[in-house]
Image (cartoon, helix red, strand yellow):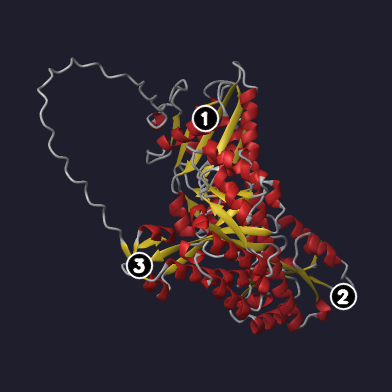
C-alpha cells in the first residue's frame, strides 16, 4: 500500500492505549480531520491494566500505544507479549521527549513507527499512520511469501522422510501414511475468501498435529495442497495405529472448528490410510493413499478407508464402522472361457460400407465482438522456482491466460479458438489486446515498487508470427508508456511447428523483440530432442515448457534433460497432486505450475507471493 493509498483508505479502526485523557482528545481531533470515517477506541492502561489473553487485537487496523503505560509498565513489554500471528494491527509507539533511543527497540519488537509526543502534529501523525500501514502491508506480503516457501520446502522434506521410513522399516515396526482431505473446501473458499480459508486449513493442520502429539506417536504432518494434509506415522507400536488415528480425526471433526472469535466452520474429512513397508516406493505409496482417500470421499460424513492390498483392520465400533471398512481389493483378471466354435456359414457377399459420418460442425464465435465488448477475463497462473538456478532470478513468473465470454454468456478458454470457426475478428487481434493488458499490468506492478519484478508468459497465435504487426503495436504502446524497460520480463511462447513454418519472419520477430526490449522466448509442446535442437540453435530460446503427463514422463524427462544441457530453463505445467510435484522435482525442472501448488490469481498485486525453493 502506498502512502497515498493509506491516506485515502485510512486504518479503518484505531485502538489508542494511553493513560492521558487530554492526549486522547488531541488524537481524536487529529484522526477526525485526517480520516473522518475511522472508528477510534481508547484504552486507559492505568485504570484497566493489561488486556485479557483473548483481547481482540485483530479487529483494529492501527494501534497507537504509549511507551509509559503507568504503574511501571511499558508499551514495549506489551508489544512483545501480545504481538503474535498475522492479526496484530500496524503499530505506532508514542515516546516522551528524550526517549528517542526507544524507537530502535520499538521497531525490533514489531512496531512500524514511533512519534515523539512533544513533536506531535497533524502532519507527523499522517506521516506515521501512512508509514505504519505501508510497512504492515509489505510485512504481511513477505509473511505470505515465507509461508508459501515453507510449504514447498516442507513437502520436499516430507518426501525424503517417507523414503527414510521405507528404507529403515522392519517387520517389528509399523508405519502408516494418511492423506486427509477437507471435503467442503470449495464452499468455504467461495463464502469466506482465500485468506480466511487458508487460515482455516492451517488451523486444521495444527489440530491434527496436536492430536497426534497427544497420542505419543512419532509423526510428520504437512499441508500438501489447498485442501490436502498428509501425515506420516512411524515407529508405531501396533498395526492398528493408522486406523486409530483416522478414527480420532473423524471424531474431532464431528464438532465445528472455531477459526476466530466470530466464525466456526463445520467440515467433514475423508482419509486414506496406507501401511508403509520396505517393498514400496514413494510414488506408489502416494498413489495408493490418494485412491483410498478418494474412496472415502464418497461418504457424506467424515470417513476413512484402508488402501486395497493392506491387511484389513478391525473397524471401530459404532456409527463409524461402515465408514471405516477397508477398501475392497479389485478382483483379479480372469480370461473368459472359450466358447465352442459356431458352425461356419456360407460366405455371403459383404454389403457396401456406409459412407463415413460427416464431421461435426465447429462451434462458431464472433471474436471481433468479444474484443470490442471487452468480454475477456484475464487470470494469472503462478510459477514456483523448483531449482536453485531458477531461485536466483529476480523475477516472479506467471502464465497469463484468458477466459473469453461470447454473446450467449458462455465462457471458454482463449486457446480453444483453434478448434472454432471464427466468424469475425482474428486471433492476432486478440494477441494485441493481451499485450496491451500485460504491459498495463507490469506498469502497475512497477509503480508499486515491488522488490521482485513480475514476468508474464504469453502464448502467441500463429497469425502474430507472420508479420510485424505485433512488434509495431508494442513499439507504439511502450513509447506512450515512457518506460522502455517495462517489457523486459515478457516471455512469448511459440509452438515448434509454427516456428518452422514461418522461420524467416519469426527469426526477425525474435531478434527485434529481444534486441529492442529484452523480451525472452519459450517453446511449448516439444516432441523430441531433434526438434528441440533445431529450434534452440536457430531461435536461442530461453525456456522450454512441458505439460505433466504421467503416461509420458520418460520422454518428458529425456527432452527436458537435453534442454538443460543446452542451457535452457525448463518449465512443467499442470501439476495436480503430490506425486506429480515429486516427479517434477526428481526430473530437475526449474519451474513448476499447477492448481495443486498455487491457484490462479485474478490480479498481479501480490507478485512477491510467488515462491522459490
| 176 or 430: nearer the viewer | 430
Q: Is residue 490 above or below residue 540?
A: below
Circle 2 residue: 97
| 421 or 63: nearer the viewer | 421
Question: Mark 2 or 3 closer to N-term?
Answer: 2
Residue drawn at point x = 64 percent, y = 23 percent? 167
Q: Residues within 10 Å of mark 2 (few under 14, many from 20)?
A: few
- Residue 130 visible in rendering: yes
Q: Residues within 10 Å of mark 1 (few under 14, many from 20)?
A: few
Select label 1 or label 2 by which is in front: 1
- Give the SS element for disc 2: loop
Left or right of 219 in this view: 359: left
**Residue 406 numbered tag:** 3
Question: Mark 1 or 3 closer to N-term?
Answer: 1
On the image, the x and y values in percent for residue 249 come to 51, 36
**Residue 505 numbered tag:** none
On the image, the x and y values in percent for residue 548 come to 51, 44
Select label 1 or label 3 by which is in front: 3
Left or right of 572 in this view: 515: right
Label 2–label 3 contact, CB within 8 A: no
Q: Residues within 10 Å of mark 3 (few under 14, many from 20)?
A: some
- Give the SS element for disc 1: helix
Mark 1–mark 2 distance (CA, rounded to whole Å):
67 Å
Mark 2–mark 3 distance (CA, rounded to whole Å):
66 Å
Q: Is residue 604 above or below residue 54?
A: below
Residue drawn at point x = 46 percent, y = 54 percent? 188
Mark 1–mark 3 distance (CA, rounded to whole Å):
44 Å
Circle 1 residue: 284
Label 1–label 3 contact, CB within 8 A: no
Left or right of 446 in this view: 547: left
Amino acid at each position: 500500500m502506498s502512502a497515498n493509498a493509506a491516506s485515502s483508505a485510512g486504518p479503518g479502526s484505531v485502538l489508542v492505549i494511553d493513560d492521558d485523557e487530554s492526549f486522547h482528545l488531541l488524537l481524536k481531533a487529529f484522526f477526525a480531520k485526517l480520516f473522518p470515517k475511522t472508528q477510534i477506541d481508547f484504552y486507559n492502561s492505568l485504570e484497566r491494566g493489561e488486556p485479557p489473553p483473548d483481547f481482540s487485537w485483530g479487529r483494529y487496523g492501527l494501534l497507537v500505544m504509549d511507551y509509559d503505560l503507568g504503574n511501571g509498565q511499558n508499551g514495549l513489554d506489551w508489544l512483545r507479549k501480545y504481538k503474535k500471528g498475522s492479526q496484530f494491527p500496524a503499530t505506532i509507539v508514542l515516546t516522551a521527549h528524550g526517549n528517542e533511543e526507544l524507537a530502535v527497540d520499538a521497531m525490533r519488537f514489531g512496531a512500524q513507527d514511533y512519534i515523539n509526543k512533544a513533536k506531535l502534529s497533524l502532519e507527523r501523525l499522517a506521516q506515521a499512520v501512512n508509514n505504519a500501514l505501508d510497512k504492515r502491508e509489505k510485512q504481511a506480503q513477505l509473511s505470505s511469501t515465507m509461508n508459501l516457501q515453507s510449504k514447498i520446502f516442507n513437502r520436499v522434506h516430507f518426501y525424503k522422510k517417507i523414503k527414510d521410513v521405507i528404507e529403515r522399516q522392519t517387520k517389528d515396526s509399523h508405519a502408516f501414511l494418511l492423506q486427509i482431505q477437507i471435503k467442503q473446501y470449495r464452499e468455504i473458499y467461495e463464502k469466506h475468501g482465500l485468506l480466511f480459508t487458508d487460515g482455516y486449513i492451517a488451523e486444521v493442520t495444527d489440530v491434527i498435529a496436536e492430536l497426534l502429539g497427544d497420542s505419543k506417536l512419532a509423526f510428520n504432518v504437512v499441508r500438501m495442497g489447498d485442501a490436502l494434509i498428509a501425515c506420516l506415522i512411524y515407529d508405531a507400536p501396533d498395526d492398528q495405529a493408522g486406523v486409530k488415528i483416522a478414527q480420532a480425526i473423524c471424531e474431532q471433526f464431528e464438532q465445528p472448528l472455531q477459526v476466530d472469535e466470530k466464525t466456526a466452520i463445520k467440515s467433514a474429512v475423508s482419509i486414506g490410510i496406507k501401511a508403509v513397508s520396505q517393498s514400496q516406493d514413494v510414488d506408489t505409496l502416494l498413489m495408493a493413499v490418494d485412491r483410498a482417500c478418494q474412496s472415502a470421499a464418497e461418504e457424506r460424513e467424515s470417513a476413512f478407508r484402508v488402501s486395497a492390498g493392506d491387511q484389513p483392520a478391525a473397524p471401530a465400533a459404532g456409527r463409524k464402522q461402515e465408514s471405516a471398512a477397508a477398501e475392497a481389493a479389485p478382483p483379479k483378471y480372469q480370461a473368459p472361457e472359450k466358447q465352442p466354435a459356431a458352425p461356419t456359414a456360407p460366405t455371403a457377399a459383404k454389403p457396401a460400407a456406409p459412407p463415413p459420418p460427416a464431421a461435426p460442425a465447429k462451434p462458431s464465435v464472433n471474436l471481433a465482438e468479444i474484443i470490442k465488448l471487452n468480454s475477456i477475463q484475464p487470470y494469472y497462473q503462478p510459477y514456483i522456482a523448483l531449482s536453485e538456478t531458477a531461485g536466483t532470478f529476480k523475477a516472479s513468473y506467471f502464465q497469463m491466460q484468458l477466459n473469453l465470454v461470447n454473446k450467449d454468456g458462455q465462457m471458454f478458454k482463449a486457446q480453444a479458438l483453434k478448434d472454432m470457426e471464427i466468424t469475425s475478428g482474428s486471433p492476432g487481434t486478440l494477441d494485441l489486446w493481451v499485450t496491451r493488458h500485460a504491459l498495463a499490468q507490469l506498469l502497475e506492478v512497477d509503480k508499486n515498487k515491488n522488490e521482485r519484478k513480475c514476468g508474464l508468459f504469453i502464448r502467441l497465435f500463429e497469425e502474430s508470427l507472420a508479420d510485424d504487426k505485433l512488434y509495431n503495436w508494442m513499439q507504439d504502446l511502450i513509447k506512450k508508456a515512457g518506460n522502455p524497460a517495462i517489457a523486459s520480463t515478457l516471455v512469448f511462447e511459440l509452438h515448434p511447428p509454427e516456428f518452422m513454418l514461418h522461420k524467416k519472419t519469426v527469426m526477425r520477430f525474435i531478434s527485434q523483440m529481444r534486441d529492442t526490449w529484452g523480451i525472452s522466448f519459450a517453446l511449448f509442446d516439444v516432441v523430441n530432442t531433434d526438434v528441440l535442437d533445431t529450434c534452440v540453435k536457430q531461435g536461442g530460446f530461453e525456456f522450454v515448457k512441458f505439460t505433466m503427463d504421467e503416461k509420458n514422463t520418460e520422454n518428458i524427462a529425456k527432452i527436458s534433460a537435453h534442454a538443460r544441457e543446452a542451457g535452457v530453463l525448463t518449465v512443467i505445467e499442470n501439476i495436480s497432486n503430490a506425486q506429480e510435484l515429486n516427479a517434477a522435482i526428481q526430473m530437475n525442472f526449474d519451474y513448476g505450475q499447477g492448481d495443486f501448488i498455487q491457484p490462479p490469481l485474478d490480479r498481479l498485486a501480490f507478485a512477491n507471493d510467488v515462491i522459490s525453493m
